[in-house]
Each structure stands twice: as structure tokens, then as C-alpha cells.
Amino acid sequence: ILYSPSITWLENAFVAILVMFCTNKCKLINKPLVVCVGIAHYQQDKNIPNADKVEHDIECYETFKKLDHYTVKCNDVSKSYTKASLVEYLENIFSTQVYDASSGNILHNGLILTISGHCTPTSLICSDGSKLSFTEILGIFTGHWKIKALVTNLPKFVIVDGQRGFEYLKNAYTTEEKQSADD
């Protein structure tokens, strides 16, 4: 693993994370799929404020495009996503970018999944207020936990950059946590 001043802090931090978590079994991830999911727009009748900084978050994660052999897929953050439309989007990525069902081949040797938007401790909040759990999202990329090669042999890294200042159950928005993190 090589440190390079020409790549960003995020790329260097990711390399450091890979080194840190490789203990018993190391795998070189040199052809990963990076899936950046961001939800910035929410239905106003749900009393969920828009997440204005999500577009910037996704732009930061797109830095992975600069790395050789990395495939980066990002949703259009200017659109709204219901739980059903987001699942459909992610399943399309799975069927075209992760796994070839006809041959049984895994098309990448690692998965980096970034999630940005309003979140609960266990879920991404979709534009319509419905929750899509992180386990469900990750399950899409393992064939719903049925394809053993994807469950056990595909290294998966999930980065949740969710604004948890939103209290989903009370429909109240607090910014204290977010402001202190920005200071």
C-alpha cells in the first residue's frame, strides 16, 4: 500500500482503513465498485428538511474516479427517491455492475458504498419519509444474502455520512449535533 501526496486525504484515509482492518486475511482491492448514494430532497409534507450539503458530499466521494480501475456510480442527487425507486436503482447497479448471474462471476473485487442524507441510527431516510435500512442496502449487493461468494469473498466498506440530527420519530429537526461537528 502506497501513500501518495497527489491523492486526497479521503483516498489516503481509505488506504489507512484498509490496512487497519486487515488482520487475519488481507485482500488487495484494486478494482472496486464505488456506489455513492445521496438523498438531498425530501417531501415537504413529511416535515423533513432538505439536506443541502449532500451534493457536496457526493462530489467529494467522486474523487475515487481519479484512481485507476475504480468504477464509480452515483445517483442523481437533484431527484427525489422513494424507498421503492432507490431499491430499484441499487438493484440495477447490482445486476449490471456487481454480479453476472449467467456466469456466476463477481465483476469487482471490492465494494465501497457511501450513504449521504438524513439517517436514523440504522437506516437512510428516503425522500418520502420511508426508511431503508443499511442492512437492506447491503443485502442488495449480496443477492439478499443468498450468494455465498458475495457474502464471504467480496470485501465491503460502508461509509455513512448521514445527518443524524434529524429525529425521525418526533419529526423534529435539531442542529446542535451537526453544528458542533462542523466547528
Image (spheres, rainbow, N blue to C red):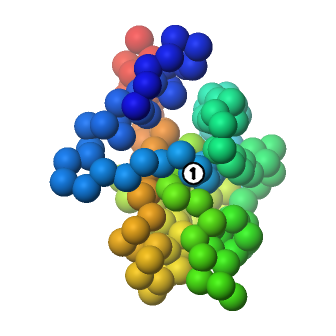
Q: Position of residue 37 (x, y in %)?
A: 63, 50
Query: Observer-nearest residue: 78 or 30?
Result: 30
Residue 38 visible somewhere in the drawing: no
List the single residue furthest toward the left.
24
| Element assignment for label 1 | loop
Q: Residue 156: image x %, image y %? A: 43, 57
Q: Position of residue 160 (x, y in %)?
A: 46, 45
Q: Which quadrant: the C terminus?
A: top left
In-front residue for pair 27/83: 27
Question: Residue, x 68% and y 30% (percent of image)?
Answer: 66
Q: What's the residue at 36%, 40% (across, down)?
A: 18
Compared with 181, 49 (above or below) is: below
In the rendered view, does 76 fall on the left or right side of 171? right
Task: Choose between 168 and 138: the one closer to the eye.
Answer: 138
Q: Inspect the image, locate mark 1, and give the three-letter code of the amino acid beneath it.
A: Pro
Q: Is residue 139 left or right of residue 42?
A: left
Asked if residue 142 shows in the view, the reply is yes
In the displayed structure image, the side of residue 151 where residue 88 appears, left or right = right
> Which residue appears at 46% of the width and 73% of the height?
150
Where 144 falls versus 37 (above or below)? below
Q: Which residue is mark 1?
A: 32
User: Could you say which quadrant of the image residue 49 lies in?
Assistant: top right
Q: Say how many tags the image has.
A: 1
Q: Is residue 6 above or below residue 37?
A: above
**Residue 81 quadrant:** bottom right
Find residue 175 and report its horizontal and vertical position in percent: 45, 28
